[in-house]
Amino acid sequence: LLTQTNSFYARACYIDTFEAKGAAEFVLHKLNTTAGAIMYYEDNDLAKVKADEFSQYYMEVTGADHITTAELPADIEDLSEIFFALHSYGIEAIYLPEKAESARRLFAAAEELGYEFSWIGTSEWKGIDAEGVYYTVDFDPDKILTARTQRFLHEYAQVHGPGSSPSENVALGFDAYLIAINGISRAGDPSDGALIASSITSIKDLAGATGTITMDSNGDPAVSRVMSRSQ
């Protein structure tokens, strides 16, 4: 809502719904499975928004009229019937747009019951102490997405020392700077705020540290999405 309510606001990080679509793409095109499902707690409004976006893209691509979804009561303790049903349906991958603490409980419950799934989550899982789960990140220094990513990493190491690695916030700050400078340059008049704002929303295929950036009419970026796997 931040960028939708003010035409002078723009961002470098992607929005939640874009993140969810990226997770669906990952399940379908990287894990190469259509045996996907969604799980979230029914009292988590943000998780429902992400689940709806995931579901919409999933159904558009697969042609299915629904996706298996487990909406969990907040006070649920016995998950045996839920996981048995998912296993019976042949589910291989579960999108779980929950915080890391909730996710760990569900991983443990599935493992205790003897069920194995590929778990896909959100950027809130960064640093999660669970093996082999996938989650979205804004930036991964081990993945070179554009020529500017390579240069950004090189210049960062020149300043901070060999082997140093920038955080995703540093990379996003760099891309925010690129977006602003590109918008000012395209506008041609650094004193015309409205023109600069309009120029920013018309940016397409800008090579950044976090990937190739195209801005939408709200000032939100469509940028290369990266999935990371916990070890």
Image: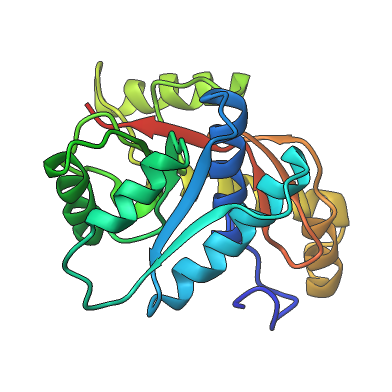
Q: Is residue 142 above or below residue 225?
A: above
Q: Quadrant of the C terminus?
A: top left
Q: How many marks?
A: 0
Q: Is residue 96 above or below residue 49?
A: above
Between residue 52 and residue 201, name the one nearer to us.
52
> From the viewer's perspective, is 101 left or right of 190?
left
**Residue 216 spot, x, y in % from top left:** 78, 57
**Residue 73 spot, x, y in % from top left:** 32, 76
Residue at 80% in and 59% down: 201
Between residue 140 and residue 231, name the one nearer to us.
231
Residue with the most extreme left position: 112
**Residue 55 spot, x, y in % from top left:** 62, 55
Question: Residue 229 is drawn in which quadrant?
Answer: top left
Question: Residue 142 is drawn in which quadrant?
Answer: top left
Question: Residue 202 is drawn in which quadrant?
Answer: bottom right
The color scheme shown is rainbow
Residue with the most extreme bottom position: 5
Residue at 71% in and 75% down: 8
Between residue 31 and residue 99, name the one nearer to us.
31
Q: Is residue 216 visible from the viewing direction of this image?
A: yes
Q: Is residue 120 visible from the viewing direction of this image?
A: no
> From the viewer's perspective, is 48 left or right of 128?
right
> From the viewer's perspective, is 78 left or right of 26?
left
**Residue 32 spot, x, y in % from top left:** 57, 23
Residue at 21% in and 78% down: 75
Q: Is residue 162 above or below residue 57?
A: above
Residue at 73% in and 53% down: 65
Q: Quadrant of the N terminus?
A: bottom right
Q: Is residue 119 above or below residue 65?
A: above
Between residue 72 and residue 180, name the one nearer to us.
72
